[in-house]
Image: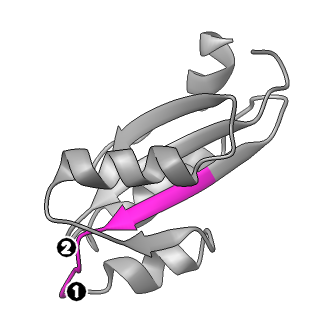
């Protein structure tokens, strides 16, 4: 896994209170390699999409449920490895590097 592209996939719906903390934690990873962030949103009525677009251009709208969102994210992913996170999670700085 060392130096491989890792795709982090986050399924969201009305997560404006959590998504930025999650995305910042991904950007702070100490993994030596590339990280691709994919957000699949279930048509949020709040600012979730706007916040996500500040961190990645890979923002897609899809529903109706989290499993369908994750499957779409996996199809869009270019990484050799996939990491699925929930929007209310905050990843420790060494999460991805410890998986390698």
**Residue depicted at 14% across the width and 64% down the height:** 64
Q: Report if residue 39 lies within the magenta region.
A: yes
> In the drawing, what numbered circle is on residue 46?
1
> In the picture provided, is 100 more to the left or to the right than 11?
right
Q: Residues within 10 Å of mark 1 (few under 14, many from 20)?
A: few
Is residue 87 shown to the viewer in this render? no
- In percent of width and height, residue 39 lies at 45, 62
User: What colour scheme has been applied to the protein in the rendered image?
Assistant: one colour
- In percent of width and height, residue 61 lies at 35, 75
Query: Do the numbered discs 1 and 2 sit on residues whose CB atoms are within 8 Å?
Result: yes
> In the picture provided, is 6 more to the left or to the right than 24?
right
- Name which of mark 1 and mark 2 comes first in the sequence: 2
Q: Which residues make up the magenta segment? A: 37-45
State the residue position of label 2.
Answer: 14
Q: Regarding mark 1 in the picture, which secondary structure is present there?
A: loop
Residue at the far front in the pictured view: 75
Disc 1 from disc 2: Cα separation: 6 Å
To which quarter of the image does residue 18 belong? Answer: bottom left
């Amino acid at each position: 896994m060392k130096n491989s592209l890792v795709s982090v996939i986050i399924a969201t719906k009305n997560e404006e209170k959590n998504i930025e903390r999650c995305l910042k934690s991904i950007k702070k990873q100490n993994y030596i390699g590339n990280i691709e962030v994919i957000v699949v949103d279930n048509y949020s009525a709040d600012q979730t999409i706007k916040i996500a677009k500040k961190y990645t251009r890979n923002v897609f709208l899809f529903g109706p449920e989290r499993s369908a969102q994750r499957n779409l994210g996996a199809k869009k992913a270019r990484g050799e490895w996939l990491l699925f996170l929930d929007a209310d999670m905050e990843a420790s700085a060494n999460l991805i590097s410890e998986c390698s």
